[in-house]
Image (cartoon, rainbow, N blue to C red):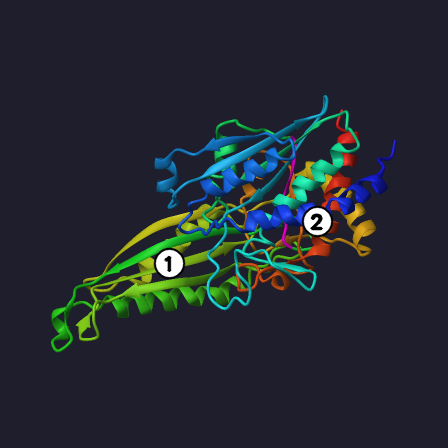
Amino acid sequence: MTPNYAALDAWIDSHFQEEVGFLQELIRVPTDTPPGNNAPHADRTAELLQAFGFQAEKHPVPAAVVQAAGLQSITNLVVRRQYGPGKTIALNAHGDVVPPGDGWTHDPYGGAVVDGKIYGRATAVSKGDFASFTFAVRALESLQPQQGAVELHFTYDEEFGGEVGPGWLLKHNITQPDLMIAAGFSYQVVTAHNGCLQMEVTVHGKMAHAAIPDSGVDAMQAAVKILAALYAQNALYQQITSKVEGITHPYLNVGTIAGGTNTNVVPGKVVFKLDRRMIPEENPVEVEAHIRQVIADAAALPGITVDIKRLLLAHSMQPLPGNAPLVDAIQKHGLAVFGEPIPATGTPLYTDVRLYAAAGIPGVIYGAGPRTVLESHAKRADERLDLEDLRRATKVIARTLADLLQSAG
């Protein structure tokens, strides 16, 4: 029996202003990460969900674990909706976001609606999918489903790697869904993504007065040599291509650097942080070993020592065979609702969805977003989400859930 898609669409249309209001409330509670004081947002989200009759389980992560991850507070939320026997489908979105930065023309925590777009940090990535997922489930329940279950996973550690977000829920057996859909950021349904290695490199020399430089060991000059060797790798990486559509080749970026004490002092220490993106075909252990060797070779200078600290090792997400029903349903309903084909592709970004895949849970990335990530201004000033994209993505998710749960027995 074919689900009543028209009824789902009509429910979403009639409750859409309520959905927008829900998203505005979520935007108005900051979740800047760093510093990562995100428990207050979880409390507010749980309160708003309660008004819909959704009881959110609160799963606070111990303070010591949170602080070790570089954050201040995290409470992950799980909402379980059981309809009958069958498969459980999880919908995951993250509430933590990078700080807004400068250049905004709208309040990043205001949720202002202007010319059909809602503005604010996390509108597109990914509080928008707190809204699309919640209202898709509410629409689904208007049809009174009889099979399977849906879980909402609202977590707060995507920006720092996910280990105390979804990783915490999975590690402690708080959830074990059969399939999952994670918050998206474009029209595409994403089935694979890059991995990411982040490292902090500290170059030690010996401080000295600039008038007598030979009495010191210049850590800055050594750092320059190391950086040149690292950046030279990018030319080699371009020769390594991925077979996953949407992903090109590996690359390396140095995002921050600091060192020295004054202009008239030979720098005794320089610290920089690098980000190495890994295509799905690469072995993370080999990638890290190679980067460490490049640094060691370049730092082989008299009086220079180097400390290397791994900050993050996020494995790539690779498609699991069981994700085909998700891809097929989203593409079918995306075409019907958006009026254009929805491609299945990879993305050079990395997400905490990889943790579900690593646990053997087939999943995809799909949610409210524009045709491209750039259009959303995600992680830039004036992040925004077109309200029609929010409405249509909610319909696609609701229709997809209806299809999958109908065959969930």
Q: Within the image, what quadrant is residue 11 found in?
A: top right
Question: Residue drawn 58% across and 52% down?
Answer: 125
For residue 66, say whether it is visible: yes
Secondary structure beneath dot 1 equals strand
**Quarter that holds the N terminus:** top right
> Camera-side residue: 330 or 126?
126
Q: Which residues are magenta?
A: 178-185
> Is 374 placed above or below 40 here?
below
Q: Residue furthest bottom?
A: 211
Q: Residue furthest top?
A: 85
Does the stretch in magenta take in 184? yes
Question: Residue drawn 70% across and 61% down?
Answer: 116
Numbered disc in front, either 2 or 1: 2
Q: Is residue 325 left or right of residue 64?
A: right
Q: Which amino acid lies under the numbered mark 2 shown in the image of this protein?
A: Gln
Q: Residues within 10 Å of mark 1 (few under 14, many from 20)?
A: some
Image position, residue 208 (x, y; %): 14, 69
Q: Which amino acid lies under the numbered mark 1 shown in the image of this protein?
A: Lys
Secondary structure beneath dot 2 equals helix
> Mark 1 — residue?
273
**Quarter that holds the C terminus:** top right
Q: Residues within 10 Å of mark 2 (few under 14, many from 20)?
A: few
Question: Residue drawn 71% across and 40% down?
Answer: 136
Tell me, for residue 17, which label it has, or none. 2
Image position, residue 369 (x, y; %): 66, 55
Q: Evaluate if marks 2 and 1 touch, with contact meaning CB atoms under 8 Å apart.
A: no
Chain-order first, disc 2 or disc 1: 2
Image position, residue 140 (x, y; %): 75, 35
